[in-house]
């Protein structure tokens, strides 16, 4: 990549360089790799006489006269009389008086915009214009025109201009980084050509070729970074062969208040066997909400600790870390294994004690948030890393925790189903264990899709459950209404329930903006049963475990994805009692149909699939629930096939040590750069 500062380019001053920085563009290379979000096909120029009201069109016209006036305060209108060979019309700008200075009377200009009528002539409300025959080489009209994602203070026109300039200045100097063999195999266009076409495609086919080429390159570099980093981590390090002695694990299991499910036994067997091998374990434990992943992870940690190693479990939120700490404490106290909890909120003295316990090895087991990956956390002998709800963490964070040990084993847990091929390609060489069985006695959560009219009934059901000694969740997807969506704010809901609906009950409020200590207090009183109702945002989505809660009311359910709703719903139905999920939704028929899938289905994988089918990959994966990495160009799972090729190629390149060959050197550097960027 071209490492020169963008400020070195013509048309870019220091001020604009600062604005570009906000877009993440610092170097000329960054700029070239800043791809358009969309394109507009302005190849076809229309004649003024042929314009149809309502259409969006581009014309080439001559300016014949100006009219300027103030329609009302703060609204200045600038109108030009224009003509081409065959007709006359108007062009219209609002609040852009400077346009008049730029476009000369009698000069020719390209105009793009929506067509209306004024004085019986077509009038274009201009969104984009360009002086014809100017030095800008027809960047904004008469071609397929790129549109970039922009922030304030920068214009599309200017960005086009400097991208074009950057392409001009680097022409012939952008090195190819793919070896010829790969370009030939996939019939990929050269890199410099692809960059030119992705910004300024001569036609749609060229754009397609450019995107295909750059996606492959992007995914190959990603896969290479994964493979390389893994190789470097393991290089010369044999990994840990954990003890074959499972006596402590057996004692742990015997002390559980329940029997393991068949799936738990099978999966635990896979994990224990894998841990005994000297090769570092990298395993993904997939299981629907409530399938009992925590116990399995605990058993694995017991094995590590039993052999004299330390184990660390990282969870995405404080609430969850605290909860895991409590659960593990309960499970492990009989074995005499102490459990420490380290979060950003741990009091200083306690924190010091934990840090020293970890480095001296006195503490065998720690649970925490991303605080665990901070620099001052060191272990004496970290042998097992467990990551809960892995989709909340980036690959870099995972690797950072692993780096605290000498090639420790890795177990990542997730309740979000990702197809195997996708998981492999995204996470590198993970083995996958699947918990495909629920603990016995679980009753599926009876789910209803309700309308506003049925609200009274919903509250009635909640009262009935509370009368039986149970507890309820009321979930409000947004904290406040700042986003302008008509979401019931959790706080408003809390007030309303407390004062009007359930004045007889104790009610708690939990949302992300509360202080951590307050959050923990609220969670704790709900857990103890002091609160009958917990009003919460989606912060309870991951992993909260209060078996006595048997009913959940979700407001504005249509705003959430099915997979996320299923996760939320998994917070109830954790005990032996019948439980309920009430989805409040508007009258939109399609949305209600979608929600009904939940009512008839309790299998998280089937639900995720249905969601994927109904909403399409964009929205389904767009929720960032799946922890899919963000690529500049490639989007998953649409580009899965390209990803699979890239993965195969990356593995082959490493296996056959093709790095040694000069034509792979560019790729090698790019992969290294990617590793730095991802902190791998
Ligand atoms: P998740 O897979 O969602 O993380 P958890 O590990 O939190 O699920 O387990 C959910 C609940 O099920 C917990 O209360 C746990 O104690 C309980 N549980 C786990 N395994 C079993 C089992 N084999 N039999 C009965 N209950 C179990
Ligand atoms: Mg869990």
Image: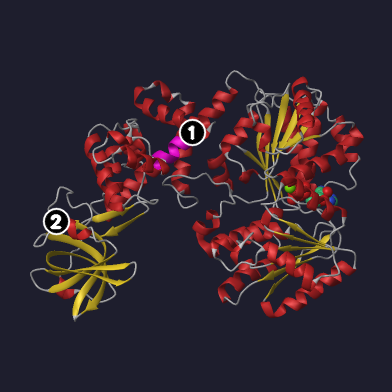
Q: Residues within 10 Å of mark 1 (few under 14, many from 20)?
A: few
- Quarter of the image for residue 607 reads bottom right
Q: Nearer the viewer, residue 609 or 298?
A: 298
Distance between the Cα atoms at labels 1 and 2?
43 Å
231 or 399: nearer the viewer: 399
Please give left or right for residue 305 compared with residue 3 in the image.
right
Q: Quadrant of the C terminus?
A: top right
Mark 1 and 2 residues: CB-CB less than 8 Å, in contact?
Answer: no
Question: Start and end of the magenta stretch?
Answer: 216-222
Q: Is residue 378 above or below residue 597?
A: above
Judged by depth in the image, the label closer to the viewer, 1 or 2, is 2
Mark 2 — residue? Answer: 132
Q: Is residue 394 visible to the viewer in this orientation of the structure?
A: yes
**Mark 2 residue crowding within 10 angstroms, few (<14) / some (14–19) / many (20+):** many
Residue 403 appears at what percent x and percent y? 63, 27
Given residues 573 and 147, the one toward you in this image is 147
Q: Secondary structure at mark 2?
A: loop
- x and y, in percent, of residue 214 in the image: 36, 42
Q: Is residue 639 left or right of residue 302?
A: left
Q: Is residue 243 above or below residue 647?
A: above
Q: How many marks?
A: 2
């Amino acid at each position: 990549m071209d490492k020169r500062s963008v400020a070195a380019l013509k048309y870019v001053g220091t001020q604009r360089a600062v604005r570009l920085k906000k877009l993440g563009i610092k170097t000329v290379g960054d700029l070239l790799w800043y791809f358009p979000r969309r394109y507009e096909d302005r190849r076809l120029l229309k004649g003024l006489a042929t314009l149809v009201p309502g259409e969006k069109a581009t014309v080439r016209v001559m300016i014949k006269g100006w009219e300027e006036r103030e329609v009302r305060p703060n609204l200045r209108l600038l109108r030009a009389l224009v003509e081409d060979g065959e007709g006359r019309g108007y062009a219209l700008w609002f609040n852009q008086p400077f346009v008049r200075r730029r476009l000369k009377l009698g000069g020719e200009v390209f105009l793009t915009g929506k067509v209306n009528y004024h004085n019986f002539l077509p009038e274009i409300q201009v969104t984009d214009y360009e002086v014809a025959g100017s030095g800008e080489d027809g960047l904004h009209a008469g071609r397929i025109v790129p549109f970039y994602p922009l922030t304030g203070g920068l214009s599309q026109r200017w960005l086009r201009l400097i991208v074009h300039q950057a392409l001009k200045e680097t022409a012939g100097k952008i090195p190819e980084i793919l070896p010829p063999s790969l370009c030939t195999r996939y019939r990929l266009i050269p890199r410099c050509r692809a960059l030119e076409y992705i910004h300024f495609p001569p036609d749609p086919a060229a754009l397609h070729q450019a995107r295909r080429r750059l996606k492959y390159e992007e995914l190959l570099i990603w896969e290479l970074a994964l493979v390389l980093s893994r190789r470097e981590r393991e290089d010369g390090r044999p990994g840990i062969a954990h003890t074959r002695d499972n006596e402590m694990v057996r004692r742990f299991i015997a002390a559980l208040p329940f029997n393991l499910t068949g799936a738990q036994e099978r999966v635990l067997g896979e994990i224990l066997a894998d841990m005994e091998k000297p090769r570092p374990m990298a395993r993904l434990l997939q299981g629907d909400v409530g399938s009992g992943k925590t116990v399995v992870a605990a058993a694995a940690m017991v094995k590590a600790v039993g052999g004299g190693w330390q184990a660390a479990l990282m969870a995405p939120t404080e609430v969850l870390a605290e909860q895991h700490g409590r659960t593990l404490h309960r499970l492990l106290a009989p074995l005499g294994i102490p459990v420490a909890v380290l979060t950003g909120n741990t009091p200083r003295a306690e924190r010091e004690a934990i840090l020293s316990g970890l480095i001296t090895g006195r503490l065998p087991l720690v649970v925490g948030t991303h605080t665990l990956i901070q620099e001052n956390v060191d272990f004496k002998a970290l042998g097992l890393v467990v990551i809960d709800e892995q989709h909340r963490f980036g690959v870099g964070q995972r690797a950072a925790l692993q780096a605290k040990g000498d090639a420790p084993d890795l177990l990542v847990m997730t309740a979000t189903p990702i197809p195997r091929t996708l998981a492999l390609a995204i996470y590198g060489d993970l083995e996958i264990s699947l918990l495909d069985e629920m603990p016995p006695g679980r009753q599926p959560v009876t789910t209803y899709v309700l309308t506003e009219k049925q609200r009274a009934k919903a509250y009635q059901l909640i009262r009935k459950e509370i009368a039986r000694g149970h507890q309820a969740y009321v979930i409000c997807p947004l904290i406040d209404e700042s986003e302008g969506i008509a979401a019931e704010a959790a706080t408003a809901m809390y007030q309303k329930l407390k004062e009007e609906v359930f004045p007889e009950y104790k009610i708690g409020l939990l949302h992300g903006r509360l202080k951590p200590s307050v959050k923990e207090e609220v969670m704790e009183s709900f857990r103890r049963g002091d609160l009958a109702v917990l009003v919460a945002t989606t912060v309870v989505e991951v992993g909260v475990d209060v078996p006595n809660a048997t009913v959940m009311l979700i407001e504005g359910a249509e705003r959430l994805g099915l997979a996320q709703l299923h996760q939320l719903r998994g917070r109830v139905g954790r005990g032996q009692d019948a439980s309920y999920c009430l989805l409040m939704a508007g009258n939109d028929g399609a949305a209600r149909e979608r929600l009904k899938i939940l009512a008839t289905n309790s299998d998280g994988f089937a639900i995720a699939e249905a969601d994927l089918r109904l909403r399409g990959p964009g929205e389904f994966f767009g929720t960032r629930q799946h922890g899919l990495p963000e690529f500049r160009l490639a989007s998953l799972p649409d580009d899965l096939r390209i990803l699979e090729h890239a993965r195969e190629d990356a593995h082959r390149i490493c296996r056959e040590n093709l790095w040694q060959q000069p034509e792979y050197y560019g790729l090698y550097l790019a992969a290294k750069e990617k590793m730095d960027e991802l902190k791998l």
